Amino acid sequence: MLAKNPHLDFNTILGLLNDMLLAAYESQDELLIGQTYRNFAFIMVHFQRYDFAAPYALGGVQLVEKIKPKLIQPFDYLMLGGLLFEARNYEEAIFYAKKGLTGTESKESKDHIIFNTIGQSFERLNQLDSAKSYYNLVDSICDLNGHRLWKYINLQNIGEIQFKEKNIPAAKESFRSVYKNGIDEVSEIAAKSLVWLAKIQLQENNLDSALSSLDEAEFILKNFSDRRLQTEYFLEDSYFTKLVAFEKLGLSDSSSFYFRKYLSLHDSLAHLASLADLSVVQTRIDHAEKTYNLGLLKVEKYKAEQRRNAIIVAILVFSAIGFTYFNWQKKRLQYKNKITTLEKEAKESEIKTVKNQLKSFTNQLLEKAKLLEELENELDSKNEAELHSEYLAKLNSSRILTDKDWSEFKLLFEKVYPGFFTSIKEKFPTITPAEMRISALIRLQFSAKEMADILGVSVDSAHKTRQRLRQRMELSSDTNLEEFISNF
């Protein structure tokens, strides 16, 4: 499809793929549906849309495995393992990646790539011993078959393990080797090694060298010819390390500048990760199937009505209209009941999807609050109060729930609890925006600590806003605020 129509944009391609899925559903052929899922996933990988690619690849492999497992190739498991890793579903990434192992030692074997995926998944799960054992397997295969570039890609992973285990001299040597040998052919990985070298240089208080390493890494990553999602993750790490370097130098303006760049990219990547969450996207697939089934039933109803018209003509001819019309009415009622049931299921599925998105969105806000709290604690512990006072003041004045955040949150909230804000505004026209936000968080049953984290205020401020809300609503001391708000 892409080879024949390279000019088509993503939305057009997505529309064509949805038509392809509809045709597969209409066939009622599970094997065809499974193969269509796999094709859908391949094309989504081209667009780096892992929120579509991961679940459709998983669904396709599971269906084909069930019906005709011989059609599954090791590459299918290799791709699925990598997609599940990108979707941060590390345990399933390990499970399916292992299925793709061939056990052969030929140069055509992709076992070293699969071992790399498994090792990285264990590392993300903080199971460092398991990660090291798989990285060692990768190293052995690379030595055996002369996979020179993969050897240095794998050495980067080994260096990160060494760093985490506090073996700094070995880690430094690994990162230098990756940079020296990979700068020309795997420059993206070489840039990543520079970021990790900079982290070591910061520990050694060699700030000028750290900034030099980070400048070169940032230049390589921004000018990388084939920027992928992992390139953005490397760049995110570079920004964070750079803001720490400027903070150590006492350059608050530069540190604040890179903090904003880091936070913007971090939010973007966190949003992509939430889209790729399998629970959210699987709900999307389930909803799509119900919608398609509803459409098929309506087509069948139309065909039934056409048949009914023909039958009525025949009945008029043979004077048997009464009996046949009774049967048609019975079928019509059955179709109507089925359509009502499917519409109800589709609506419930849509509500479930919105709730999952709302949950994912609020979790991102809590994660962002935790990040700010950890960074502030790190700054407090450095005993450089005068150098950092201005920067800490900026952190303390930052608001986590921005106007944009609130707009997105409010849109999702209204889908789950329609009319909530309108009802409260009509009942209490003088209610303030801060009290309105607290009302929504109370409706979601958040604790005072969670409200404070989401709104970027102290717990005491959250309590005070809550108290003002009770006064605004003129509630007596024996009236439960949560129960009162839940009635809107």
Image (cartoon, grey):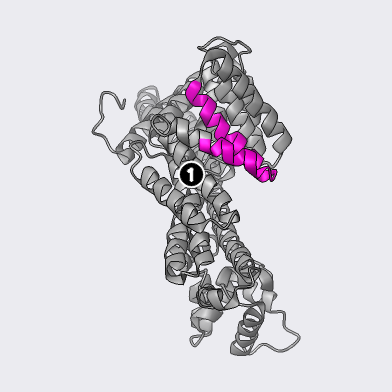
The one of 280 and 221 positioned closer to us in this rendering: 221
The amino acid pointed to by label 1 is Leu
* Left or right, residue 175 beside residue 232: right
The x, y position of residue 23, in whole percent, is 40, 26
- 464, above or below 209, in the image: below
Quadrant of image for the C terminus = bottom right
The x, y position of residue 241, in whole percent, is 51, 55
Which residue is drawn at the image coordinates 42% and 46% (left, top)? 217
The one of 85 and 157 positioned closer to us in this rendering: 157
- Magenta stretch: give its range: 148-176
Label 1: how many Cα within 10 Å (few below 14, some 14–19, many 20+): many
Residue 157 in view, yes or no: yes
The x, y position of residue 417, in whole percent, is 55, 64
What residue does disc 1 label? 194
| Secondary structure beneath label 1 | helix
Residue 124 in view, yes or no: no
- 272, above or below 180, in the image: below
Q: Is 149 included in the stretch rendered in magenta?
A: yes
Type of secondary structure dominating the magenta stretch: helix
Quadrant of image for the N terminus = top left
- 343, above or below 438, in the image: above
Which residue is drawn at the image coordinates 60% and 38% (left, top)? 159
- 101, above or below 352, in the image: above
